[in-house]
Structures are given as C-alpha cells and as structure tokens.
Image (tube, rainbow, N blue to C red):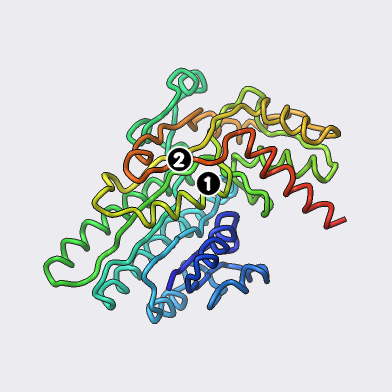
Amino acid sequence: MILVTGAGGEIGQSLIAALAERGEELLAVDLRPLPNDTAALCAETITADICSAELHAQLRRKPIRTIFHLAAILSSQAEREPELAHRVNVEGTLLLLQTAHYLGKQHRAPVLFLFPSSIAVYGLPSREEKLRVGKVSEEQFLTPMTIYGASKLYCELLGQYYARYYRRLADEVESGWIDFRALRFPGLLSAFTRPTGGTSDYAPEMVHAAAEGKPYDCFVTPDTWLPFMAMPDAIRALLLLATAPAERLRRTAYNVTAFSVSAATIAELVAELFPGAQIQFRPDPRRQAIVDTWPADIDDSAARSDWDWAPEYDLQRTFTEYLAPNIARRYRLDC
C-alpha cells in the first residue's frame, strides 16, 4: 500500500492519478475531503490533521510500504502563520517519520519515504548575487530566509538522520528502516488545480486570470527570474526517484528543474496565448523579498547522473501544449 499525505493539493491530485494508472493500492490523507474524482482512485481516504495522534495510530495498522509526504503549509501562508507552518511542516513530518520507522519494524523491511522539498531551502543574500551566481547546486547558499524554507531544509536533514540512525539499528537487529529520498522542486505549474498559496504561483495565476477574462496584478517585478517545471514532469521526477536503485543514489536530496524564466517573459507568453490578457506588475514588497532570495536557476546534474532525470516539458511546450489549452478548457466548461 502507498500512503499519500496532502493528497488534495496540487501535487497530490496529479500523483494519485499517476499511481492509480499504475494499479497501485492507495491510502490518501488530507485535512479536507478529497475531490470525488481523486477519492475514487483510492482504496481508502482519511480526513485528518497530519499532527493527529489518532491518525498515526490508524496508519500504524496499515500495510504501508511507501510514503509520499506532501502535506505542508506553503510559503506565503507560512510567512503569515509561522507557528502553524512549524507545527505542520516540521512536527507533522517528524511524526510521520516515527510512524514509518514503526511500520518498517513491523514489516521487517524498509519503508520508502519520498519528501518534496523546495528551492526555498536556498537563501541568496541579494538580488544582485542571485543573478550573478546563476545555477545553484545542492550544497550552496543553504541559508533559507523563510519559515517554509527553514522547515523544508530541517526536514531534509531529519529524514537523512532517521534513515541513517535507524538503518544502523536495523542492521543490528535485522529489522526495517526508512529509505528517505527528497526532491528540491522549483516553481510547479499545474493545469488542473488552482494555485494554493505558493510564492511562485504568479506564473499559473497569470494563465488562470487570462483564461477567465479577469485582470491580474502580478506580485513580483518583470525582471524576477525563477526556475519552473510543469506538473507532469514533477510527477515523473517523484516516480523516477522512487524507483531508482538505492546503490545509484549518492545523496538524499536532489535538485530538479526544467527551465528558468523571467516574469516578463511569462506575461508575454500568456498575452500571446490569450490576446485579451490584462496583466500589470504591482510588486508586493514582502513576497518580492522572498523570491529575491531564491535562485534564478538550479543545477540538477546530480539527478541527471544518478537516476537519469531529464524534463520533457520546456518553456514553450509547458505553456502552449499543457497550461493554455487545459486551463482554457476548464473555464469554458465552467461557463
């Protein structure tokens, strides 16, 4: 059985669809009831807080061998509610790692634990430095400026610790352990779910607003650069890492990306695809300050080398073949 937490989110719904297509038995957990079409793909759904002791008691009675831990408070909301972000993002992850260890002992086999991290773990000192350094590798600038980034980085280290510590114990007593693997995602672009509070969500928000025929005020400056990835590539990356032979993996956390682009270029593309688009740039100083600490691009050569990662969607294909037609269809159906 595969457990997916945060199953109702942008990544969760797409991941469940991909896993169900493979015929996997799925247990989905989210704070809110799942959309009917997503719930129908699961053997079981649980509506619960990831920090609930009752939830973890339930999970420990399930035959779970793989965990995709997606539940999290995203960056913009996390800055508004840092205590909540710490409780969900850190304490929730710690509880799930403890549950994974318990399940490993019960099954006397490793439990695979996939964790989506973020470029928010990086913290560049200034916009000038961000543009100067270009691609950032996994070991550089690990000084996050937000509670979201700090919690993601800490959970990467926590997962690494649990994997190593309990592997040693497992070797001593011939028991199970945690096989922890993390991906540092760039901004993710989904055509089938609405943006849910990420600081990079200005890109999909432009497309949704244009498709709805609504004006959009972009909260970053036109010359803001970030790396992005289409959701189908994000799901492929998770599944590729999950199935990669352990002996090929030289690290527990990997960068992955597809393309880097400015907000101005995104606005131009959206205007070409939706000629009536009304996009203005009205930067929000608080959100702009966060984005300015994130890399303009990231180096994912380790993922390409260790488990054959390569994106299938570049900038043009993402917008012209994936985002624009699917989002336009969504709003035509809604009308």
Write the residue at 62% across / 68% down.
Answer: 38
Identify the image quadrant of the C terminus.
Answer: bottom right
Residues packed near mark 1 inside 10 Å, few (<14), some (14 to 19) or many (20 plus): many
Give the residue type at disc 1.
Answer: Asp
Q: Along the polypeptide, which appears first: circle 2 or circle 1?
A: 1
Nearest the camera: 188 or 97?
A: 188
Q: Position of residue 48 (x, y in %)?
A: 54, 72
Percent across and percent down for residue 203 are 66, 38
The answer to which quarter of the image holds residue 299 is: top left
| Tag count | 2
Task: Give neighbour class at mark 2: few <14, some 14-19, many 20+ (Cα, 10 Å).
Answer: some
* Tag 2: amino acid: Ala
Real-space Cα separation, disc 2 to disc 1, in angstroms: 9 Å
> SS class of the residue under badge 2?
loop
> What x and y, as percent, mark residue 33?
63, 71
Q: Who is closer to the viewer here, 315 or 70?
A: 315
Q: Give left or right: position of 51 versus 32.
A: left
Q: Is 212 displayed left or right of 31 in the figure?
A: right
Whether residue 182 is situated above or below residue 292 in the rendered picture: below
Q: Residue furthest left?
A: 172
| Image-based side of 322 in relation to 165, left or right | right
The quadrant of the image that shows the N terminus is bottom left
Question: Which residue is depicted at the point 59% across and 45% down?
Answer: 198
Q: Nearer the viewer, residue 255 or 222?
A: 255
- Taking the spot 63% from the left edge, 48% from the top edge, the residue there is 190
The residue singled out by tag 1 in the image is 233
Q: Position of residue 318 (x, y in %)?
A: 63, 39
Q: Which residue is mark 2?
A: 310
Q: Which quadrant holds residue 93?
A: bottom left
Q: Is residue 118 above or below residue 224?
A: below
